[in-house]
């Protein structure tokens, strides 16, 4: 199976991910997952929701990244829980930086804005007003 092949997912798998994360995922991300769950955007690894029907392809899910590698990076930069409480990483750039939904900021669509989180400093910079705008962003890695 090709790395770029889209497999999609189900509303039930998305609901399970939201429950595990304790957050509602942005609608534009949900719509993308329903068709593209497990798909990368070029060199950018977008985290899928775990789907038992595609367990091998979705094992490295958004929930798994949030509980493991994201927490490790926060420890590396000396961030405390309140520093990153509003952030939910949804993609990782090869350098260790994460694209995150920032639930403390909403864009014009009412969705959380997309920020780039630096693994070196723990600082964020806004890159798009929502996930849909992120997908068409010129110069986005991938």
Image: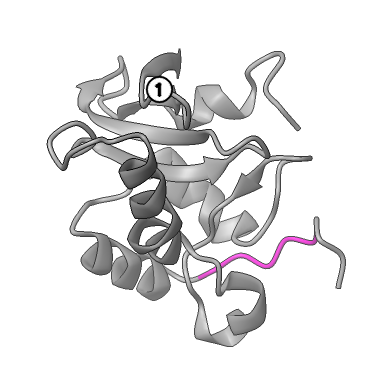
The answer to which quarter of the image holds residue 19 is bottom left
Q: Position of residue 34 (x, y in %)?
A: 53, 59
What residue do we see at 39% from left, 53% from top? 72
Q: In this rendering, is residue 10 above or below 88?
A: below
Q: Residue at x 53, y 60 (%)?
A: 48
Graded by Cα atoms within 10 Å as few (under 14), some (14 to 19) or many (20 or more), the crowding at tag 1 reads few
Q: Which residues are magenta?
A: 5-9
Where residue 12 appears, as percent x and y from the top left, is 36, 75
Q: From the viewer's perspective, is 37 left or right of 22?
A: right
User: Residue sitting at 30 percent across and 17 percent down?
Assistant: 107
Report the magenta stretch's main SS.
Answer: loop
Out of 10 and 125, give the one closest to the viewer: 125
**The N terminus lies in quadrant:** bottom right
Q: State the quadrant of the C terminus.
A: top right
On screen, residue 59 above or below 117? below
Residue position for label 1 = 121
Q: Is residue 131 above or below residue 46?
A: above
**29 in the magenta segment:** no
Residue 33: x, y in percent?
53, 55
For label 1, the SS is loop
Query: Observer-nearest residue: 86 or 128?
Result: 86
Q: In the rendered view, does 104 fall on the left or right side of 27?
A: left
In the image, residue 105 above or below residue 36 = above
| Direction left: furthest residue | 82
Q: Position of residue 84 (x, y in %)?
A: 24, 36
Write the residue at 32% across / 22% down. Answer: 109
Position of 136 with respect to 3 (left or right) is: left
Looking at the image, residue 85 sits to the left or right of residue 129; the answer is left
Residue 20 is at least partly visible in this image: yes
């Amino acid at each position: 199976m090709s790395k770029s092949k889209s497999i999609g997912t189900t509303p039930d798998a998305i609901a399970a991910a939201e429950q595990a994360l304790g957050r509602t995922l942005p609608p534009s991300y949900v719509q993308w997952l329903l068709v593209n769950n497990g798909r990368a955007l070029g060199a950018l690894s977008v985290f899928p929701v775990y789907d038992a029907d595609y367990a091998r392809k979705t094992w490295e899910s958004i929930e798994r990244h949030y509980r493991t590698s994201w927490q490790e990076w926060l420890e590396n930069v000396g961030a405390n829980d309140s520093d990153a409480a509003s952030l939910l990483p949804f993609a990782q750039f090869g350098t260790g930086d994460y694209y995150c939904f920032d639930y403390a900021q909403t864009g014009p669509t009412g969705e959380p804005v997309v920020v780039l989180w630096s693994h070196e400093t723990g600082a964020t910079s806004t890159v798009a007003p929502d996930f849909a705008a992120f997908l068409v962003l010129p110069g986005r890695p991938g």
